[in-house]
Image (spheres, coloured by chain):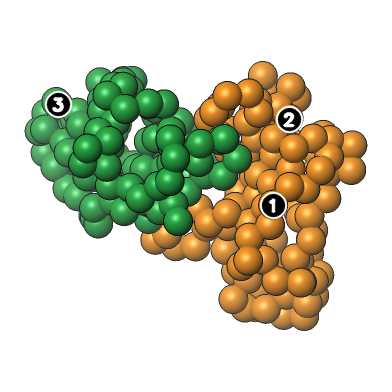
Amino acid sequence: DTGVSQDPRHKITKRGQNVTFRCDPISEHNRLYWYRQTLGQGPEFLTYFQNEAQLEKSRLLSDRFSAERPKGSFSTLEIQRTEQGDSAMYLCASSPGTDVGPLHFGNGTRLTVT
Amino acid sequence: GNSVTQMEGPVTLSEEAFLTINCTYTATGYPSLFWYVQYPGEGLQLLLKATKADDKGSNKGFEATYRKETTSFHLEKGSVQVSDSAVYFCALSDTAGNQFYFGTGTSLTVIP
């Protein structure tokens, strides 16, 4: 169990640019989640996958956000035409998908949009 | 809908003091309840969980009991240490375990 890994740890981009983040979940975990966390707040749900199927997306997720998990293993989260309001910590988590397995979080990708 | 409300911080305690962080929830069905901890510079880690009413989760001296009648899951520790300084998040999952909802977090600082 090597844990959930996220890349990059930090990303600084200019407004209007596109960014892509990667998440590698724990290998035997079927479920993969993306959350966003801003300063002083708890993680806010964005979307989740069961294997390669994206089962739910938050209403907060605008059309500029897209996530994929093409082979049911790693996942990518892309933000197009970034805005300053997108600045946040983007967290990935995985769970076994059996019963109510707890979430195992990565260390996150901190995005700063200038 | 599902939501979690936890006491606001920051909380500052002296070493060996008693800790309570309040958490109440609103949920439909039969949620599971969790406490996560985030140490400085690290990701969120599961601290403890309870999956049904009256269950008590415990870990590292922390405890929380799932109280359905009061819709609460308060975190307690009898004697805190400096190393417990962190942000604590209460969370619930829906009955199927598909979605997880987090509180806003409570920052704890323990001073020697």
Residue receiving disc 3: B79
**Which chain does the residue under circle 3 lie in?**
B
> What shade has chain A been given?
orange
**Numbered badge on residue A56:** 1
Q: Nearer the viewer, mark 1 or mark 3?
A: 1
What is the quadrant of the N terminus of chain A in the image? top right
Q: Nearer the viewer, mark 2 or mark 1?
A: 1
Is A66 left or right of A32, judged from the image as shown?
A: right
Q: CA distance from mark 2 to mark 3?
A: 38 Å
Residue at x 73% of width, y 30% of height? A30
Is A77 left or right of B66, judged from the image as shown?
A: right
Q: Identify the image quadrant of residue A69.
A: top right
Q: Position of residue A12 (x, y in %)?
A: 68, 67
Residue at x 75% of width, y 65% of height? A65
Q: CA distance from mark 2 to mark 1?
A: 15 Å
Q: Identify the image quadrant of residue A23.
A: top right
Q: Position of residue B42 (x, y in %)?
A: 50, 40
Q: Identify the image quadrant of residue B86.
A: top left
Q: Are marks 2 and 1 on the same chain?
A: yes
Q: Are marks 1 and 3 on the same chain?
A: no
The residue type indicated by label 3 comes to Ser
How crowded is the residue under tag 3: few (<14 C-alpha within 10 Å), some, or many (20+)? some
What is the quadrant of the C terminus of chain A in the image? bottom right
Q: Nearer the viewer, residue A54 or A25?
A: A54
Residue receiving disc 2: A30
